[in-house]
Image (cartoon, helix red, strand yellow):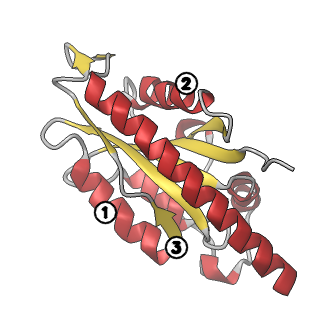
Amino acid sequence: MPEAPLAVAVIIGSTRPNRHGEPVARWVLERAAQREDLAADVIDLATIDLPMFDEPMPPISGEYAHEHTREWAATIARYDAFVFVSPEYNRSIPGVLKNAIDFLYHEWTDKAAGFVSYGADAGGARAVEHLRLVMGELRIADVRTMVPLSLSHDFENFSHFAPSETPIVKADAMLAELATWGLALRAVRASRAVAA
């Protein structure tokens, strides 16, 4: 019996007006749609009603006092893997993305993640370096291939998204790695559930 496609959330990590994340996320969705082993959706943090972290207990406890946290937990729990679409802000990630990640723990663990970043100098690579540190703490397996997008080369006049050939190749490679790791970790979660 064939494996069900992996449920992948493409998370837009910026809420800034006129952000570049929306067209980039749609592009990732289109690339993922070409694979039969992935079923991707977009999660836009601009539409998720999360305040600054306000839970009285640490997320690792799994005890959520607020409805907004329970709704966010239920959303993230549905997915096998994630693609974080993030700009680079001052050599790191946007605060809204870090805040959304920090609300939860168990809903993230033993899943896979890939990264698509954008920025002026290094294509957002320094933001991805920070995300990789966070992923390790959450027990998310982040794939090696990332997709750095240059605001000068992959966006016409710094606004209209028009990726060059290199990001397309990298995106397809990243999604292939995500599928491999996502399937393996789905088996890990299944084994853990049986043991529990």
Quadrant of the snapshot with the C terminus: bottom right
| Pointer 1 local density, CA inside 10 Å: few below 14, some 14–19, many at least 20 | some
- Whether label 1 touches label 2, CB < 8 Å: no
Residue 185 percent location from the top left of the image: 64, 66
**Nearer to us in this view, 12 or 41:** 41
Q: Which residue is mark 2?
A: 30
Q: Secondary structure at mark 1?
A: helix
Tell which circle, 1 or 3, labels the residue nearer the N-terminal end: 1
Tell me the mark number nearer the camera, choosing from 1 and 2: 2
Residue at mark 3 to residue at mark 2: CA–CA distance: 28 Å
- Any part of residue 57 in sight: no
User: What amino acid type should be assigned to the residue bearing mark 1?
Assistant: His
Residue 7 percent location from the top left of the image: 70, 46
Q: Secondary structure at mark 2?
A: helix
Q: Which mark is residue 28?
A: none
Q: Which mark is residue 138?
A: 3
Vertical side of 3 occupied by 87: above or below: above
- Any part of residue 81 in sight: yes
Is 62 on the left-hand or right-hand side of 130? right
Vertical side of 82 occupied by 14: above or below: above
Dividing the picture into quadrants, the one containing residue 151 is top left
User: What amino acid type should be assigned to the residue bearing mark 2?
Assistant: Glu
| Pointer 2 local density, CA inside 10 Å: few below 14, some 14–19, many at least 20 | few
Q: Which residue is mark 1?
A: 130
Residue at mark 1 to residue at mark 2: CA–CA distance: 26 Å
Tell me the mark number nearer the camera, choosing from 3 and 2: 2
**Nearer to us in this view, 162 or 2:** 2
**Nearer to us in this view, 75 or 161:** 161
User: What amino acid type should be assigned to the residue bearing mark 3?
Assistant: Leu
Q: Secondary structure at mark 3?
A: loop
| Pointer 3 local density, CA inside 10 Å: few below 14, some 14–19, many at least 20 | many
